[in-house]
Every structure is written in structure tokens, then in C-alpha cells.
Image (cartoon, rainbow, N blue to C red):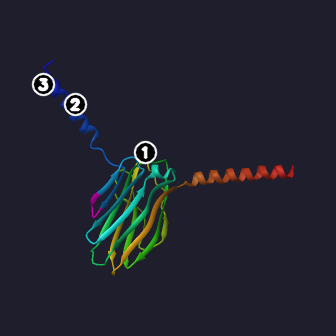
């Protein structure tokens, strides 16, 4: 076979495979003001430390693999953001994709931390298309500490979770120091099964004591 024809065939095959598979996508992504600044594949952890305008940002997020527990899905364990008060609004976006769904999932969103001279809104979203979108609101707060239990969702095969943090300084020395996370909670059927199992165990122990 002519070498030029062979090269053309290989190039055509590679291009067709790229069109089918599409570009590779990171599992964990951090963006600042809608500009991606850090990413990682494998759902372990991703971090970013840098200066954006007058804002000093230091943050680290753990994915489900890094947390080592299928119940804990996404943990922004280090969220330290500060400015001298002259900076304008700032938006941080954290995305985790390729999370494995079950028949039914329910999520607990938890927010904790301290706020100093700053207005902050922290929001968690669920996207059942696994594209890092913001179609389903899981929970949001402007408080330093809060938690929300979501409705039940059929998550299918894969889904993604996104947290959006919007910050506005209200004075000099503005600072957010937080720890935000989302976890999967057992669906009601599993809780009922667990409860019946514990009840049965209790009855067995009681019978042994009376025997």
C-alpha cells in the first residue's frame, strides 16, 4: 500500500475517533470569575493558591476518591478568601463530574466557617447530565453555618455536583474561611431496612438474655 495512502487512513481513523470520544474532561475543576485555574482527573483532590485582583485565594477540594467514602461526595475542606476591602465581587466555582449514581439518591449539603466584613452566598447544584451544570439546586446559604437536605433524585449512571461561591466585601479586612461539603444519605428504603435489621438484632439479644 502506498505510504501516503496509509498515513491518510491513519489520520482519518484518529480524527473519527476524536469526533466520537470528544475531548478529555477533568473530574475536578476550580474556576475564578468563570476562568478555569485548576483541574484534576481521578476525583482525588485539586487546589488553587493565587492572587486575583485584590483577592487572595487559597482553596482545596476533595473528590469522592480522595475522601475514600462513597457517602462523602465533595468536600471543599479549605476555603480561605480575603481582600483588603477594595476588591470588587468575586466568584469561585467548584465542579466534580463523573460521580456514580444509584436508583435513588438524596444529598445533604453542609456549610461551615467564619465571615468577616464580607457578604457571601454559597450554593450547591446537582446536574443529572454530568456536565457540571446548575440545573438542580441542592442548598444555598448566606450564613456562616447551615445545612440542607435535598429531595430524592434518580441520579442514573453518572452525575456532577457544582458549588458556586459569590463574595462581596463590605469593609476592609474582608475574609471568608469555610468548609463546605455534600454527602449522599441513605434513601428511605435503605434506612427502613437498616432499622429492621437493628430491631431484629435487639430481639435476638433479648432472647439470649432471658434464655
Which residue in the structure is indicated by mark 2?
Answer: 13
Asked whether 98 falls inside the magenta stretch, the response is no
Asked whether, in this view, residue 203 is left or right of residue 72, the answer is right
Mark 3 / mark 2, whichever is N-terminal: 3
Q: CA distance from mark 3 to mark 2?
A: 14 Å
Front tag of 1 and 2:
2
- Between residue 12 and residue 92, name the one nearer to us: 92
Question: Is the N terminus in the top left, top right, bottom left or bottom right quadrant?
Answer: top left
Q: Are marks 1 and 2 in contact (CB under 8 Å)?
A: no
Q: Which residue is mark 3?
A: 4
Residue, x 49% and y 57% (percent of image)?
A: 183
Question: Is residue 146 rendered to the left or right of residue 210?
Answer: left
Mark 2: give few (<14), some (14-19) or many (20+) Cα within 10 Å.
Answer: few
Q: Nearer the viewer, mark 1 or mark 3?
A: 3
Mark 1, secondary structure of its residue? loop
Q: Position of residue 75 (x, y in %)?
A: 45, 59
Residue 131, visible in the rendered structure: no
Query: Looking at the magenta stretch, what is its main secondary structure?
Result: strand
> Does dot 3 land on a helix, a strand or a loop?
helix
Whether the magenta-drawn stretch holds residue 34 is answered as: yes
Instruction: Tell me which label, 1 or 2, sits earlier in the chain.
Output: 2
Q: Residue at x 38, y 62 (%)?
A: 59
Residue to which mark 1 is pinned? 157
10 Å crowding of disc 1: few (<14), some (14-19), many (20+): some
Q: Which residues are magenta?
A: 32-36
Amino acid at each position: 500500500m502506498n505510504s501516503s495512502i496509509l498515513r491518510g487512513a491513519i489520520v482519518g481513523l484518529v480524527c473519527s475517533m476524536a469526533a466520537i470520544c470528544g475531548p478529555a474532561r477533568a473530574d475536578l475543576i476550580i474556576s475564578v470569575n468563570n476562568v478555569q485555574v485548576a483541574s484534576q482527573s481521578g476525583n482525588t483532590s485539586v487546589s488553587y493558591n493565587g492572587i486575583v485582583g485584590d483577592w487572595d485565594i487559597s482553596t482545596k477540594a476533595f473528590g469522592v476518591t480522595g475522601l475514600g467514602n462513597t457517602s462523602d461526595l465533595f468536600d471543599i475542606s479549605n476555603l480561605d478568601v480575603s481582600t483588603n476591602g477594595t476588591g470588587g465581587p468575586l466568584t469561585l466555582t467548584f465542579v466534580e463530574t463523573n460521580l456514580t449514581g444509584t436508583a435513588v439518591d438524596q444529598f445533604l449539603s453542609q456549610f461551615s466557617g467564619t465571615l468577616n466584613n464580607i457578604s457571601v452566598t454559597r450554593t450547591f447544584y446537582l446536574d443529572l447530565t454530568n456536565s457540571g451544570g446548575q440545573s438542580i439546586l441542592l442548598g444555598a446559604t448566606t450564613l456562616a453555618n447551615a445545612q440542607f437536605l435535598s429531595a430524592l433524585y434518580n441520579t442514573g449512571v453518572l452525575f456532577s455536583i457544582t458549588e458556586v461561591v459569590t463574595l462581596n466585601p463590605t469593609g476592609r479586612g474582608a475574609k471568608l474561611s469555610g468548609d463546605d461539603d455534600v454527602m449522599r444519605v441513605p434513601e428511605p428504603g435503605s434506612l427502613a431496612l437498616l432499622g429492621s435489621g437493628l430491631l431484629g438484632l435487639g430481639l435476638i439479644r433479648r432472647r439470649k438474655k432471658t434464655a
